[in-house]
Image (spheres, rainbow, N blue to C red):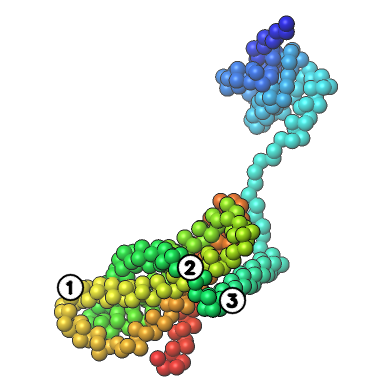
Amino acid sequence: MAFLEKNTAPKMDLQDDDSDRKLLALSGDWTISTAGDAEKKISELEIDRSGLTCIDVSMIEHLDTSGAWLIHRTRAQLEFEGRKVGLRGVSPVRQTLFDELERYHPPSWKPERDGFSIVGFLETTGRVVVESGKDSLAMLHILGSLGSVMSTVLLNPRRLRGISIAVQFDRSCIGAVPIVALMSFLIGAIISQQGGFYLKQFGADIFVVDLAGILVLREIGVILTAIMVAGRSGSAFTAELGSMRMQEEVDALHVIGLRVTEVLVLPRILALMIALPILTFISDIAALLGSGLITWAYLDIPPAAFLVQLRAAITIDTLVVGLVKAPFMALIVGLIACVEGLKVEGSSESLGRHTTMAVVKSIFLVIVVDGIFAIFFAAIGV
């Protein structure tokens, strides 16, 4: 019957060396089994480190990698004080162990600081351009696939997934009404308060109604709604499709012969294109309501005068300009969200990165498209 050999507790003893120097003599077992006791003794070690020049390991009975690492670390801490500390009584076998520890000892971390260079700047710019080209091709691929699916659905309406569209519409539109209405109400109130503050100085405070009406109906209502939808519904689309990619549900759809665009992408984009004009109209009404209340309370313009001035300032074209933009912005938000969701790989880090990129790209392109529409409507005189 074999018995386990009892470990000898590690010991540390300070001794006098030549030339009034100190010698730290180690004994006992310095192994993984006694590492806790050795760690405690090292932490309690109180010596005049300026006088310690050597660590004697000749009396150590058993030594493994854990014990050697503790000795190596203690030696490094002592040398950090500014004096060279050597090892004494190291056998050739143990010397090999200490050499390996020194060889694989991780270097201290240093932050990478790459200096600016024209080549590096051009390389980074090229990579961004290439990635932008790939994203554009991916969006065109999804758009072409949507066109193919839509033609199929028009020829066979039974393939249109009405329940999926209704569910996505409920999440994208009905669920977003409170936050869109609240934010638009506050924005309309802020526009009227700030505009009235400056116009009042010139006695033209009544024209704050024109300012708020035209600005809200043509620009602020639709772009604010599109940005909130991009942050709310667009990120949700990316997260949903990304999670399905991580769980291989998208691959399962391919295996059973279903088209991902028809099953996952089309219902979301159609629901978003229906929802955004409705949300834009609600946003316009909420913003004008906030503007009317502020002009009544801040500028003493009663609601009846506000409505009369608003009717004179805007036309039906003003409302239509804002609503026409909404489906195109919804299409952009939906395409980017779905493309980024389908690009997710098998990690949560990838999911978070692509969700963030979807929101950022959607907001950027929404603003770009709004600028293009502004130039277009100005060119045709609307």
Q: CA separation, marks 1 and 3? A: 55 Å
Amino acid type assigned to the residue bearing label 3 in the image? Ser
Residue at the spot 73% in from the left edge and 8% down from the top edge:
2
Q: Is residue 371 left or right of residue 173?
A: right
Amino acid type assigned to the residue bearing label 1 in the image? Ala
Between disc 1 and disc 2, whose residue precedes? Answer: 2
Which type of secondary structure does the marked residue at label 2 adopt?
loop
Q: Is residue 79 left or right of residue 288?
A: right
Total numbered labels placed on residues in the image:
3
Q: Residue furthest bottom?
A: 381
Percent position of residue 12, x then y: 65, 15
Q: Depth-wise, is mark 1 or mark 3 nearer the camera? A: 3
What residue would you read off at disc 3? 148
Residue at the spot 77% in from the left edge and 35% down from the top edge:
103
Q: Residues within 10 Å of mark 3 (few under 14, many from 20)?
A: few
Q: CA separation, marks 1 and 2? A: 49 Å
Which type of secondary structure does the marked residue at label 1 adopt?
helix
Is residue 322 placed above or below 167 in the rendered structure?
below
Q: Nearer the viewer, residue 356 or 236?
A: 236
Which type of secondary structure does the marked residue at label 3 adopt?
helix
Q: Is residue 299 visible?
A: yes
- The image quadrant that residue 20 belongs to is top right
Amino acid type assigned to the residue bearing label 2 in the image? Arg
Q: Which mark is residue 297?
A: 1
Residue at the spot 63% in from the left edge and 20% down from the top edge:
35
Q: Nearer the viewer, residue 105 or 279?
A: 279
- The image quadrant that residue 167 belongs to is bottom left
What residue would you read off at disc 2? 161
Is residue 347 placed above or below 366 in the rendered structure?
above
Q: Residues within 10 Å of mark 2 (few under 14, many from 20)?
A: some
